[in-house]
Image (spheres, rainbow, N blue to C red):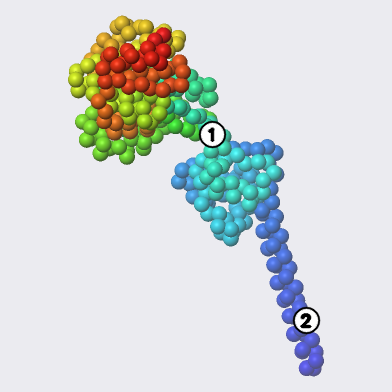
Amino acid sequence: MKTQLKNKKVLIALVSVCIIVAAALSVFVYYKTGLKAAGSKTAVTFTVEQGENSDIVLSRLQEQKLIRNKTVAKLYMKFHGLNDIKAGNFKLEADWDTPQILEALNDVKQADAGDIKITFKEGMWAKDVAALIEQKTGVSKKELLALWNDDAYLKTLIKKYSFLNEDILNAQYKVKLEGYLYPETYSFHKDATAKEITETFLNQFEAAIKPYEADIKKSNMSMQELITFASIVQYEASTKTDMEMIAGVFQNRMKLGMSLDSSVTVCYALYDDMTSGEDCEVNTHIDSPYNTYKNAGLPIGPILNPGAAAIDAVLHPKNNDYLYFVADIYGDGKVYYAKTLQEQEANIDKYNLRK
């Protein structure tokens, strides 16, 4: 009797172990199967919106048949510390399994898959910025330039951005947002609109100018004056040192009531009619509010889109007693400074800069 009872207990134990093992195996198979690639036929771009939590993201992945099992994916995320899903556009390959997809969604470097990256260099004119955007995104140059001169739209921007004011509404400007299309590398969504692109530039300008708030207030320049001044300095110089020196020269001239006589302002005055740098040197007579040979002080507005170095140079110019400078624009770009017109002429002759 005792032997029978003992055998029965052993049998029950064995059956229980078998059930537990079978259950464990079932869970293991369920888990491993749930992690396999869902069988997508092509690579897709999957967008995670700003503020979306992991439950929403996993639900959408399952609905789009990019993962097999939301519950398994959630467990994998927890076990492997993949809870920091980034916002952005992700390129998910057709043969990726759930772990690969989750790792991609946690990688900020992959968060712009499908976006269009464009680098805008310091010193570009707004019309050239617009042309590059058209080339890369398909948003037309004509639409962008029209938007950047649209007073109704610009007034909404003035309300949104504290650095903008009604100074930009001047009817004589060639492009009213000239100067504020901050040079940087941007990622634009492939379906970005002209307004979204514009405000991406302005958001970056706002971030770039923020560290200078105290310096701008101390300078007593309006934002429009600062960016106008910086745009000339950006055009005239290729190095940070020369930017600071030239900003100092221009300040010296303005303090003495001298015109700036900057040929780069003539370049902008000529605009579509400029074919070479030499045109700017021989057309100083042109009648334009941008021409600093014919108008005292700064030109009417910015003549290009300056970068941080030029803005910083205007706010922190190099103190000097020079009133003139000339650059070897046909050679190595070296800038020669002079205290008098006689010295300036001597430099031009000495370095063969008279073209």
Q: Which mark is residue 115?
A: 1
Along the line of sight, the residue nearer the viewer: 314 or 103 = 314
Task: From this view, report whether residue 44 is shown above or below residue 19.
Answer: above
Which residue is at the front of the view, 76 or 174? 174
Q: Which mark is residue 11?
A: 2
| Quadrant of the rendered image containing residue 209 | top left
Residue drawn at (70%, 72%), measured in percent from left and top? 20
Quadrant of residue 28 in the image?
bottom right
Badge 1 amino acid:
Asp
How many neighbours does mark 2 have within 10 angstroms: few (below 14), some (14-19), or many (20 or more)? few
Residue at image coords 31%, 16%: 344
- State left or right for residue 112 relative to residue 309: right
Q: Give the quarter of the image for residue 154.
A: top left
Q: Is residue 196 visible?
A: no
SS state under label 2: helix
- Amino acid type, label 2: Leu
Q: State the residue in front, 304 or 240.
A: 240
Query: Residue 51: x and y, percent?
Result: 45, 46
Q: Does 344 sit left or right of 24 as displayed?
A: left
For the residues labelled 2 and 1, the Cα–Cα distance comes to: 64 Å
Point out the image quarter for the N terminus.
bottom right
Q: At which x and y percent is residue 52?
A: 48, 46
In the structure shown, which secondary structural element does the residue marked by tag 1 occupy?
loop
Counting labels gives: 2
Q: Residues within 10 Å of mark 1 (few under 14, many from 20)?
A: many
- Furthest residue toward bottom: 1
Question: If the image is split into quadrants, where does the C terminus sit?
Answer: top left
The location of residue 255, given as percent across then percent down, is: 20, 23
Residue 291 locus on image (x, y percent): 30, 12
